[in-house]
Structures are given as C-alpha cells and as structure tokens.
Image (cartoon, rainbow, N blue to C red):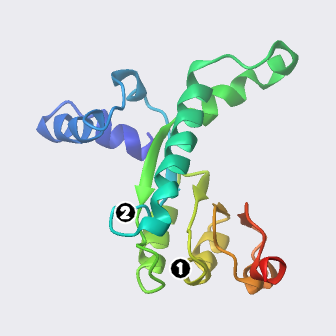
Amino acid sequence: PLRSVEWFGRQDIYGFIYRSWVKNRGVPQDQFDGRPVIGICNTWSELTPCNTHFRVIAEHVKAGVLEAGEKRLDEKLAELKDLQSKIQGLLKQYDDQGDPTISPTQAQAAVANKKLIAIVGPAFSGATAAAEPYYKKAHLATVSPSATRVTLATSGWNNFFRVVADDGVQG
C-alpha cells in the first residue's frame, strides 16, 4: 500500500491524529481514499516578505491537483482516463527555509517518499544547487519558481526546470 494509506488509513488514534492534522488545513475527507502524496517545496514565511508570493503559487498548485482529481478530462482525452486517477493526490510540503545546508535534508526526505512525482521548488539558487543532486538521482522532476543562477541549467540536471529567466538574461 501507499505510505499515505499507511498513515491516513489507520483506524487507531494515530490515524485519527494524522487525518486531523491535514483536515485542519482544509483537506476534505474524500482525499483519504488511498491517493498518492504530491510534494510542494515552498519557502513562504511571514518573516520573509520577498517570498510571500510563494504561498499563492503553492495554493494554486494545490488547487490544480485537487481539481485534477475532481473533474473529468476532456472527451478528446478519453484514452487518458486512467491517468486522471493516477494524478490525484494529497500535497506534501517540505520546507528548506531557502538554506543550502537544510535543503539536502529536505530533499532526502522528499525522495524517500516513493509516491512523489514532482517538486515545486526549491525557490533559491543555493538551496536548489544543494538539493538537485538528490532529486536527479531519484529521477524526480523539480520546477523552481525563482531559482535564477545560470549554472543550474548547465549542471547536467535534466530533471530541473524553472519558470523565470536566469541571471544571465535578467542581468
């Protein structure tokens, strides 16, 4: 069984506690039906104003995952119906605090979850450079919303993607 089932499917006090933690964050009961966990790496904090937009990005990613699990795919994509059930899941957050000394530990925790299919993050270039070898070894795709160091794209990490231009373009 999936690790998430081993946690959230338990019918003892610990299962109750695990479900309560995430239900308290707004995850509905129907999300505990054996779906895999999808990780979001996010450095949002009230103490770092430059990262406050990551909270919104993470919420949009979460909404997209939940929506994918609730809506049918377009009729033109009917042959992908099985894929729809495979991409449904709970979200898992790993916080590297933007710190290159913490990022490898968080990356190792993420790749240990064999049901993860992708990571949104890390956000900072230093944390990304420190974590990316672990993600590459695990064949786990990463999409950074803000890591801009030029060498990140030339380090041989074919699993690394970003949604912003690098420092060489930005100047």
SS state under label 2: loop
Give me the residue at 56% from left, 84% from top: 126
Asked if residue 39 is positioned above or below residue 12 in the image, the reply reads: below
Task: Identify the mark at residue 45; answer none if there is no mark.
Answer: 2
Give me the residue at 72% from left, 80% from top: 152
- Looking at the image, which residue sits at the far left? 13
Task: Identify the mark at residue 117; answer none if there is no mark.
Answer: none
For the C terminus, give its image quadrant.
bottom right
Answer with left or right where residue 72 lies relative to residue 119: right
Q: Amino acid at mark 2?
A: Ser
Asked if residue 106 is positioned above or below residue 88 in the image, the reply reads: below
Q: Foreground: 10 or 90?
A: 90
Give me the residue at 81% from left, 17% from top: 78
Q: Amino acid at mark 1?
A: Ala
Q: Foreground: 105 or 44?
A: 44
* Residue position marked by numbered label 1 in the rendering: 127
- Looking at the image, which residue sits at the far top? 75
Give me the residue at 56% from left, 69% from top: 123
Q: Position of residue 83 (x, y in %)?
A: 71, 30
**Residue 110 visible (yes or no):** yes
Q: Quadrant of residue 33?
A: top left
